[in-house]
Image: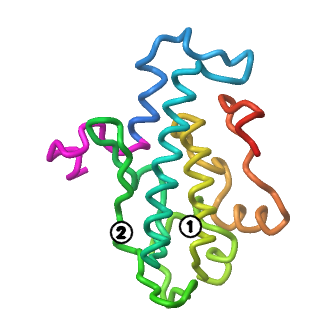
Amino acid sequence: SHLSDSGVCPFGDLKTYLTSYQSSRDPSLFDASRDICGQDVKTEFINYGMQIANGMDFLESEEIVLRTLTSRSIYIGYNKECKVTDLGLSTAVMSLAEFELETRGRLPVRWMALESLLDCFYTTKSDTWSFGIVLWEIFSFGCVPYAGLSPNELTHELQRGYRIPKPLHCDKHMLV
């Protein structure tokens, strides 16, 4: 929260912004009966996704595996620009495209790819999985991914092929 406190990112973290977003907007912008939200909202959310993807692309070009991408680790600046933060668990992998974590601490399991959950194995592809979960968070207005599943249940369900259902406000054209 130091970024929002310092004025650099006045909208705070993306998670907080998303959870307060719907309640602060005109309810007519949202049309749950059609499973989509208004075009302005959809455009804003797509823009966030594109900015985050660009940030992740930059980190990959620098050979950095982030490991901790969540909506809480993204801050929103003055012009609604997204800033990927929380690089504390990231690592420069130099010429390697993957690495293994030697110790387990508190990790964002709901955002982690199966190979990371099972084997502590991280790549830019596992960061891509986390990015997909962040997109889900964006279009669900900051809901908790895989709500109702414990970490053990989540791992088991992912092994069985379960995937998180699309958010209510994400129309079928967003899923490609």
Sort mark 2 into few (<14), some (14-19) or many (20+) by Cα contacts within 10 Å: some
In the rendered view, does 61 fall on the left or right side of 117?
left
- Per the rendered image, the range of residues in magenta is 1-15
Q: Which residue is mark 2?
A: 87
Percent across and percent down for residue 125 are: 63, 71
Measured as percent of width and height from the top left, residue 80 is found at: 35, 36
Q: Is residue 10 magenta?
A: yes
User: How many numbered discs, if any?
Assistant: 2
> Residue 132 falls in which quadrant of the image?
bottom right
Spot the residue most to the right: 160
Residue labelled with disc 1 = 127
Q: Earlier in the sequence, mark 1 or mark 2?
A: 2
Residue that extends furthest to the left in the rendered view of this protein? 6
| Residue at screen point 61% across, 82% down | 121
Q: In this picture, is 3 found above or below 30?
A: below
**Amino acid type shown at disc 2:** Leu
Decide: is 143 above or below 118.
above
Q: Nearer the viewer, residue 70 or 59?
A: 59
Where residue 131 appears, x then y in whole percent?
Answer: 57, 56
Left or right: residue 132 compared with residue 52 = right
Q: CA distance from mark 1 to mark 2?
A: 13 Å
Q: Position of residue 126 (x, y in %)?
A: 61, 70
